Each structure stands twice: as C-alpha cells, then as structure tokens.
Image (tube, rainbow, N blue to C red):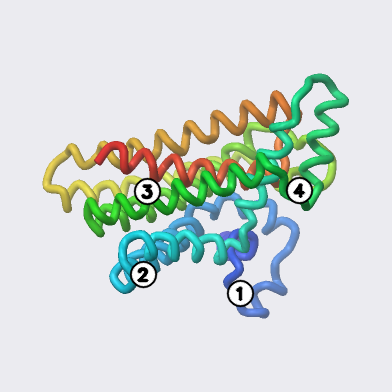
Amino acid sequence: MRAARAVAAAWSLLTILPLPRSVSRRLEASDWARCGAAFPLVGLALGLLVAAIAHVGIDLLGTEAGAAVAVIASAILTAGLHLDGLADCADALGARGSGEAQRRRRLDILRDSATGAYGALALISALLLQTTTIASLSLAGATGMVVALTLALPLARTAGVVHAALLLPARRSGLGASFAVSRGALITALVGALLITGAISAAWVVDQHELRGLAEPVAALVGAAVAVAVTTRLAAAKLGGRTGDTIGATIVLAETLALLGFLAAR
C-alpha cells in the first residue's frame, strides 16, 4: 500500500494526468517524501505515451511535424514544470559574479517568474534538440525512436532523484527543500531505472540481432549521467545546493542528452 501511494504521489508531481479523488485524498506527507523511488516508473509510463504520440504523429503529419507534436505533448503532460526549471536555472546561472551576495541574487532570480535571454535560449535549444533528435531517430527506424524515448524519460526522472540526493537544499523553503530523497528511495529509484533500462536494452538487442545494439542504451545512460554531473556541479558552485528548478533542469538536460546519446550511437 505504501508503494502504491508513493507511485500516486510521483504521478501527481510529474504529470497533469489526474488520479481518482479517492486516491489523491489519501496521500500523506510521508508519501511525498518517498515518491522519488517511483520516478523511473512514472518516467516509463510517460515515455511509452510520448513514444506512441510520436509514432502516430509522424505517420499522420510527417517526420518533423510529428516529432514536434511529441515534444509539445511531453511538455503539456508535465505542465512545462521541468522546462520552467531549466529556463530559471539558465537565467540564474547566467548572472555573473561570485560570493555570497551573488549566490543570493541567483536564488532571487530563480524565484522570479519572468524569463530572460538565457532562459529563452535554453528553452529553444532544448526543444529544438529534442525535436530534431526524435525526427532523426525516426528516419533511422521507428523502433529505435520508440526505444530511445522509453529509455530517455525514465532515465531523466531518475537523474532528477540522483541530483536531489547528492545536494543539500540551497534554501529552507520550496520544492528543493521539501523533496528530501532518503537513501532507500534513492536505491529503489536506481534499481528501478536499471531494471527498466536492462529490459528495454535486451528487447532492443533481440530486435537488432546483435550485441552491438547495447551501444545505444549505454550511450543514453551515459548522457543522463553527464547531465547529473553538470547540473549538480553548477548548482553546488553557483547556488550552494539544489532547488526545485535545478531538479527540473536536470530532468530536461538528462532527457535531451540521453536522446542525443542514443542517436550518436546509432
């Protein structure tokens, strides 16, 4: 029962798709604290849904338009939450200077709802890269595109959990402070991500009829790991810890780099 409530809490946090009111009313503070463990599972569900949208969209509209529809659908399904974090982080980290006063200024920028030049550039770059990568993967084969998306989305959500576990909160309030990942939740998330990656990779290798098929999933995993390393280092150096925005930025960057890694290894 606890596991089911943790999944429900993760689903409510990561998607706009509603749960039955009888389920959402039962969620407690402890369920939100454990929900990081279920991030890979929710990511898998989102990956399958976005992959289906991409497949149908490309069949109906063509490669580029179908890929764009899939990226837009992904943003809508997540209420743009992670993209907002990416934009805010880009604006904050783009502020020059050093020292405690500058760190506080960056945290103030994160609270500002306005999007500046760095944030706009980061959003455009991420959306363009995801759209063109999905289109290129589709041209190389529809199966590869589906596999890449069903790998990238759970890996990206797991990356957000790892980032949160590696850093202390940068401030006492906000999502970054409340989203405390326990060791048990971190281990569960990592095991879940590895099981999902292993199962999808095995199916992909069978489809390719050669062990070389492992190169793409491994490259996707490396891409997600690189994203965690980059955002964690920057958040620690520039902000003094994690925030809800840095978690969101990690998810977007990990998803983008995982897709790019899969494409590069094709």
Disc with the residue nearer the chain's start (3 vs 2): 2
What residue is shown with label 1? 18
Residue beneath disc 2 = 57
Task: Judge depth for marks 4 and 1 and give the one in front.
Answer: 1
As measured in the structure, the alpha-carbon distance from the residue carrying label 1 to the one carrying label 3 is: 30 Å
Alpha carbons under labels 4 and 1: distance apart = 22 Å
Rendered view: 170 above or below 77: above
| Image mark for residue 228 | none
Residue matched to label 3: 133
Of all residues shown, which one is farthest toward the top? 99
Q: Position of residue 44 (x, y in %)?
A: 44, 57
Residue at (70, 71) in percent of width and height:
26
Q: Amino acid at mark 1?
A: Pro
Q: Position of residue 266 (x, y in %)?
A: 24, 41
Q: Residue 16 or 177: which is nearer the viewer?
A: 16
Sequence order check, earlier mark of 1 and 2: 1
Q: Quadrant of residue 149?
A: bottom left
Q: What amino acid is found at the position of numbered circle 3 in the picture?
A: Thr
Pointer 4: residues within 10 angstroms few (<14), some, or many (20+)? some
Q: Is residue 261 left or right of residue 176?
A: left
Residue type, label 4: Ser
Residue at point 22%, 55% (across, down)? 141
